[in-house]
Image (tube, rainbow, N blue to C red):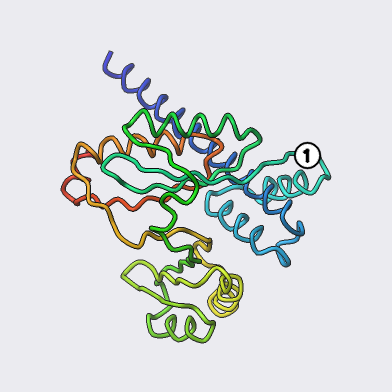
């Protein structure tokens, strides 16, 4: 019985991993679609498409599937249209949360996002209700590898970036949304393709929460991430390391 139970557990875990991969693929394909609709289906002339393709490769999506998604988005093999929407609200413990989504049904997505907030004691607010607590910036990540901190900082300054924070694992470059494309292209020319490059929301201040609030918040974020319409989630929570370790056990 023990062996049988172990096999079933392995199968459940594999099924969960496969389901997660499928959701990631769905989200990436939607982003490629939106990128193509907003500009040319050529990554050389569409920064957003380049960022979407980079994300797809990071998720181990094959070039064939990426090319197929671009063809579909450009109308060569079917049409799908998704609208960009952003939701803002407060999660457990007063944590500010921004949810970015791509949807073909605004009413459905709004209802599902609102339900996730409500289920775990949060409140979905109006547009702009928490956005003022974040800065919209471009973030470009490079692994430290063979790139020294000084060399990266010099390159960032030369490219017009705002800041570079380095640790043992990575260099995190930040810049304004307006200069994002130029900074990314300049660094890519010098150091090759980055680990990631995207526009994001960085919190100006953090919101410390206790263990009970953290447990509810993480469940809420998991529920939102499981939604195919949700692309990105940003929140300003601060969880103590010992609490995070207990919740992750």
- Where is residue 40 drawn, in percent x and y? 77, 59
Residue sitting at x 66%, y 50%: 32
Please determine whether, in this image, residue 151 is positioned above or below residue 23: below
- Where is residue 186 drawn, in percent x and y? 58, 78
Residue sitting at x 32%, y 71%: 167
Q: Quadrant of residue 90?
A: top left
Q: Is residue 41 left or right of residue 63?
A: right
Towards the viewer: 180 or 63: 180
Towards the viewer: 99 or 239: 99
Towards the viewer: 95 or 198: 95
Please tell me whether mark 1 sits on a helix, a strand or a loop.
loop
Towards the viewer: 164 or 117: 117
Q: Which residue is mark 1?
A: 79
The N terminus is located in which quarter? top left
Q: Is residue 155 left or right of residue 36?
A: left
Please determine whether, in this image, residue 57 is positioned above or below residue 65: below
- Where is residue 129 drawn, in percent x and y? 43, 49
- Where is residue 83 drawn, in percent x and y? 65, 43
């Amino acid at each position: 019985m023990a062996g049988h139970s172990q096999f079933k557990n392995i199968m459940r875990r594999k099924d969960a991993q496969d389901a997660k991969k499928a959701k990631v693929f769905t989200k990436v394909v939607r982003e490629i679609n939106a990128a193509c609709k907003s500009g040319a289906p050529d990554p050389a002339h569409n920064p957003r498409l380049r960022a979407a393709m980079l994300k797809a490769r990071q998720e181990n999506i094959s070039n064939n599937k990426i090319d197929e998604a671009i063809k579909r988005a450009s109308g060569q093999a079917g049409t799908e249209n998704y609208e960009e929407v952003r939701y803002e609200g407060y999660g457990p413990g007063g944590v500010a949360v921004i949810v970015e989504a791509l949807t073909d049904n605004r009413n459905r997505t709004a209802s599902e996002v609102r339900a996730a907030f409500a289920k775990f004691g949060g409140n979905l607010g109006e547009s702009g209700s928490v956005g003022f607590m974040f800065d919209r910036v471009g973030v470009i990540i490079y692994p430290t590898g063979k790139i020294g901190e000084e060399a990266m900082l010099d390159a960032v300054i030369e490219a017009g970036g705002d800041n570079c924070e380095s640790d043992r694992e990575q260099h995190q470059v930040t810049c304004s949304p307006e200069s994002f494309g130029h900074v990314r292209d300049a660094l890519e020319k010098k150091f090759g393709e980055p680990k990631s490059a995207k526009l994001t929301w960085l919190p100006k201040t953090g919101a410390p929460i206790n263990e009970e609030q953290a447990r509810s918040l993480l469940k809420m974020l998991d529920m939102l991430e499981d939604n195919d319409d949700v692309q990105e989630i940003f929140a300003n929570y601060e969880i103590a390391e010992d609490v995070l370790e207990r919740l992750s056990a």
